[in-house]
Image (tube, helix red, strand yellow):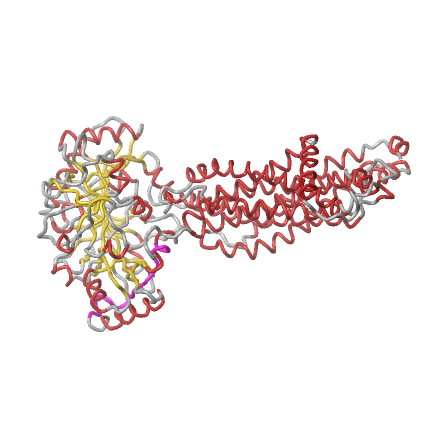
Amino acid sequence: PRRGRPFNMRLFIQDLRYAIRALVKRPGYTTSVVATLALAVGATTSVFSVVNGVLLRPLPIPDPQQVVRVWEVDQRPDFLDDKNMVAVANYGDWQDQNRVFDAMAAFQQYPITLRGDGDPRHIMAAFVSGDFFKVLGVRAATGRTFLPEDDSRDAQQVVVISDRFWKRGLSGVSDVLGSTLGIGSNAYPIVGVLPPSFDQLDQGIDVLMPLGLRPSQFDNRRSHTINVIARIKTGVSIEEAQQDMDRIVDGLRPLHPQFLEGWGVNVQSLTDAIVGDIRPALLVLQAGVIVLLIIATVNVTNIMLARTVAEQRELAIRTALGAGRGRLIGQKLSEAATLAAVGGILGVLLAYALTGVLLAFAPDNLPMVEQVGISGPVLAFALAVTALAAFTFALAPALQASTPKLSIALKTRNASVDRRHHRFRAVLVVAQLAFSLTLLISAGLLVKTFFHLMQVDPGFRATGIATAKITLPFRSYPTSVDQAAFYERILEQVRMRPGVASAGATKFLPMVDEEWTWSVQIEGQPERLDGEKRDYGRHAVMPGYFEAMNIALRQGRLINDFDRVDNPPVAVVNEAFVSRFFSAGGDVVGSRMMIIGEEGWIEIVGVVGNVHHYTLDTNPQPAYYAPLVQFPDDFGFGIAMNVVIRTDGNPGAALNATHNAVRELDPSVAISEKSTMVDHVATSVARSRFAMTLLSTFALIAGVLATIGVYGVVSYTVGQRTQEIGVRLALGARGPSILGDIVGGAVKLAFAGVTIGIAGAIFVTRFQESLLFGVSTVDPMTYGGLAATLVVVAGAAAFFPAFRASRTDPMRVLREE
């Protein structure tokens, strides 16, 4: 072809065929580029599939941006909490006085006992008010949802079931409408089945029932027991809704200061309420794999540049025969397109597998997980990143290929390139090292966070503890005395089993259940100061609980079998409670406290160590424990309790014994959530482990690619300096001098890379501060240790080609030249 001939499809196909033949003849080069690209595209796409499903795809409801959660906010300074459940009386006032919502609804969630064939079992139920489905815009796929008249305690109780429960729990039977569910001691007719999209909003809900709030409940501002959702009117923003709710609370506060002083309201989009906690971790992971893609692209660029240098003689010959600059560029672009196509396809296939691995590592409560998958937008993302990577790594080699040095390439078989291209490759290596260090430091901070979490004393010894939740039917066990008597008999049988060291029970299991809070008054102290918080965790327990959990006794005694309903009420408090309400050195045991709203004083008989009830990275809060049998009958505490068993042997055997004991004592009682405290603790740190594991994996891959980049550049440099090295050796230079010179050059590149990388990490790690615990975003040990490690690894990568160069035979080199 003539020089300067314009591009056309025939020439493109010709170049493409040539590129394919050339790549087949160089399997090592082809494999390294394709594997690097496939790994980067696969990792980036798989993480994006999770980000897309969880964060980017809209909720599967009409106009999801208009649906919000409304929380009460505890604004008191010693324990700020912006996501509290709502008092029914406040909810009623919000409904009546707001100007910004089309509808507002309340709901509660808790497990119920399902009877049927086989043993009773727990399922998760949502008790919802009349406008619940209106707020969400959800209609039944089969049958109907609730009518206004259903939302009453006097109405016939009916249920709506989720699509997942219909298919899995009821085997998808076609005549499900009109059939009944045995719940507790009653049978409830099924009037509707929800669409599959509802399962994506809350994966745990099996059954929905009318909430049926009583008129008397709308006078209660003390108990925060319901969740609230609302649909904003068209044209109203969340900020405007927040202002309107603030107006309502500000107006109510002077009317009910004893309940609303120090309290506010928080309007949050439903999307943020569902996915907000996981968003930082997913965004950090997505940023991490994008950095990995950049490093892989730089690595491929270096590989292709090295290959282009090796082709200088061939390119020069083609130029001499009339090939124009555009044709030479076209050949390189065709080669890059071929590599990118193969790497991209393999990357997408890898992404299918990696997405499954990601979900296996993901926390069990990862929201919107059913939307995660390799969908159209995810494939478009994979195509886009592949094309962008291909253009990036093809650009420099294509420009280099278009300007071959004819006078040099035609005179010698050795490839040659000028200093400008050498400097460019060095800059690429510095960039690789900088990006790698930034990623390594981000991962290192998460590793250190996880290490610190694992060093936190949870306040109990998890090893050897088996747990199970037992739910009693209220009609059979209406009083706390009845409930305590049942658990007492179960615990007696369990304690008799070989290998059981101790056993007890608690309403709220650490790391699993959210504790309820009640306000307290200490004898001799004011009831409450303005804006002061005095409502803390109130735990119903059975004797043996502290021994089974190995919670340390600090003062006094623990709850025992003598603490009966006809004996004076007692409580055990934790150290945080003592610090909050008693001066240093004060006499705690023997003091008395009162639950505000209830009658009678409770004697504090003991002090136990603090327990991290929610997560390991949240400080223990004041809490008090009392025997279940001494709780009021209408308290509702004893319906479901967690049995905890400390064993010297197999926890599974203890759980089987508990199951058998429950079946023998009352076959209508459900037992579920059989697990161990070790598993519960592991679940509590699952999100930290998820982010740490994946980002560390990506960081290590990036470090390996950067090391390969250093090795490639040094090898290339040594190849270019073969004649120089041979002459220096012939003139008397010693091998160690050559070795030091080459390794020193690589170390200089490494120092430049880590310097830039440290600066980048200082900027980037600010965005992951919410994921850290016990470590600063500028932790000097992490920065210094990883920077030094990367320099050493880069020096080691340079050592091997440098060592070969130091052993060069100068006579052979001079004869060849």
Q: Is residue 391 magenta?
A: no
Q: How many marks?
A: 0
The location of residue 645, given as percent across then percent down, is: 26, 35
Quarter of the image containing the N terminus?
top right
Q: Nearer the viewer, residue 353 or 751?
A: 353
Q: Is 3 located above or below residue 217 in the figure?
A: above
Whether residue 785 is visible, yes or no, is no
Q: Is residue 267 magenta?
A: yes
Q: Is residue 3 left or right of residue 554?
A: right
Residue 592, quarter of the rendered image: bottom left
The location of residue 2, given as percent across then percent down, is: 79, 45
The boundaries of the magenta stretch are 256-273
The location of residue 362, given as percent across then percent down, is: 41, 41
Q: Nearer the viewer, residue 96 or 384?
A: 384
Q: Is residue 395 left or right of residue 373?
A: right
Q: Is residue 733 left or right of residue 185?
A: right
Quarter of the image containing the C terminus?
top right
Q: Is 664 located above or below residue 768 in the figure?
A: above
Whether residue 155 is visible, yes or no, is yes
Q: Is 124 located above or below residue 803 in the figure?
A: below
Q: Is 528 located above or below residue 690 in the figure?
A: below
Residue 247, quarter of the rendered image: bottom left
Residue 714, quarter of the rendered image: top right
Q: Residue furthest top?
A: 498
The location of residue 79, given as percent across then percent down, is: 33, 60
Q: Is residue 145 left or right of residue 82?
A: left
